[in-house]
Amino acid sequence: MKVAKSDFFKYQTQTTPNPLGLEVDFARGNYIYDNKGIKYLDFVAGVSACNLGHCHPVVEKSIIKQLKKYMHVMVYGEFIQKKSVQFCKLLAGEFPENLQNIYLTNSGTEAIEGAIKLAKSVTGRQEIISASNSYHGSTQGSLSVLGKEAQKKAFRPLIPSIKFITYNNEEEINAITHKTAAVVLETIQGGAGFILPKNEYLKKVKNRCEQVGCLLILDEIQTGFGRTGTLFGFEKFEVIPDILVIGKAMANGLPVGAFCSAKKYMEQMQQQTKLGHITTFGGNAVIASAAYATLKVLLKSKLIHQVKEKELLFRKYLTHPKIKKINGTGLMLAIILETSNEANELVLKCLERKLILFWLLWETRAVRISPPLTITKKEIKKGCQIILNVLDEI
Ligand SMILES: Cc1ncc(COP(=O)(O)O)c(C=O)c1O
């Protein structure tokens, strides 16, 4: 039965005034199909969440197999559940020792909440330092460390003792002191325009954290699981955080997140406060089965190794006088145009031509390109041609 568009507007809350309104029937691989059977090439991947493409058969099979056994019993780290343990062990195998203890959550923002609590608990300090123009999620703790006042004003008071520094500004690193519990940074700033750390900025922040005895939290919710050409961005920038926060592509489209740290820190939080962080569904059996299958496929396949080559193809095709620059790295790219109007038009007109693009949060002249890592060279060429044709017209 067809769903009336008017019911969508009447009964479901929207987050933007003019939703794209694509009526989705199903999605497979690098395409989303609408209710008329028309297929759209997806350069967004559920906002960097479906790195293996939609409904990857191995992930799908793993979920169905788990569904037939059980969906949910209890998490809280009480019962031993095969898929969660297998996932955590496989992921830990990719990490340095100080990140090998993994707390599974429902979402990225919940994982940020957990990471902030962990840092406060471990250091006994209250101050958190974040970066202006950052995005870390929409719950109150994550919102407190989010670096855009306009987004927070209506919801104050938020958590006290939060300070902001300018990302990539080395002088401001001195604001990190012995009072600081943690510094929380995106490895690559997303909403700000896919801004990369420059001049070993993250290394310098980490050094300062070590000097003053505070923890470095890296938010890799968007950069994780191969998106930038390494499994995680911290490998690329050669900085090991004290707490790593992940989510989005972790279960290739099911809701999940995690904060990862040293076992001694997690134990400290647990001993200090009984049930220091609890969550009813975080990483339950179905989600964990998807996460485990996703990670196995990612590690076995050549997808991550092919990211650089695909990035270069995008950069080769996307030359146009209206494109001022392309920010980002790997398959986390942002086309920067001259005005936000152009960015708006580009997204809307490409949708008419069956190519899905999307905007970034704070950089309004940007259009995101974050396709599934499974995107083919042919599809990259086809999608870029649509973009160039639209740019010629606007
Ligand atoms: C860098 C970053 N941190 C945190 C979040 C919040 O994650 P979630 O939407 O799963 O709560 C996002 C989501 O867009 C993100 O990109």
Image (cartoon, rainbow, N blue to C red):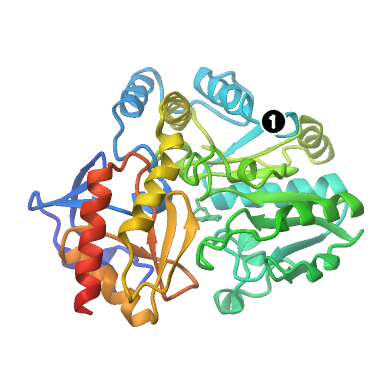
Residue at the image position 19 percent from the left and 77 percent from the top? 393
Instruction: Please state if 228 lies on the left or on the right of 245 as rendered.
Output: left
Mark yes or no: residue 21 visible.
no
Nearest the camera: 132 or 350? 350
The amino acid on which the numbered mark 1 sits, given as a three-letter code, is Asn
- Can you say which quadrant of the picture contains the C terminus? bottom left
Nearest the camera: 381 or 4? 381
Q: Which residue is mark 1?
A: 101
Q: Is residue 147 above or below residue 293?
A: below
Residue 66, picture quadrant: top left
Mark yes or no: residue 27 visible.
yes
Q: Is residue 48 above or below residue 320?
A: above
Nearest the camera: 314 or 118? 314
Nearest the camera: 278 or 254? 254
Residue at the image position 54 percent from the left and 39 percent from the top? 230
Instruction: Please state if 289 lies on the left or on the right of 200 as rendered.
Output: left
* Residue 156 % position (x, y): 65, 75
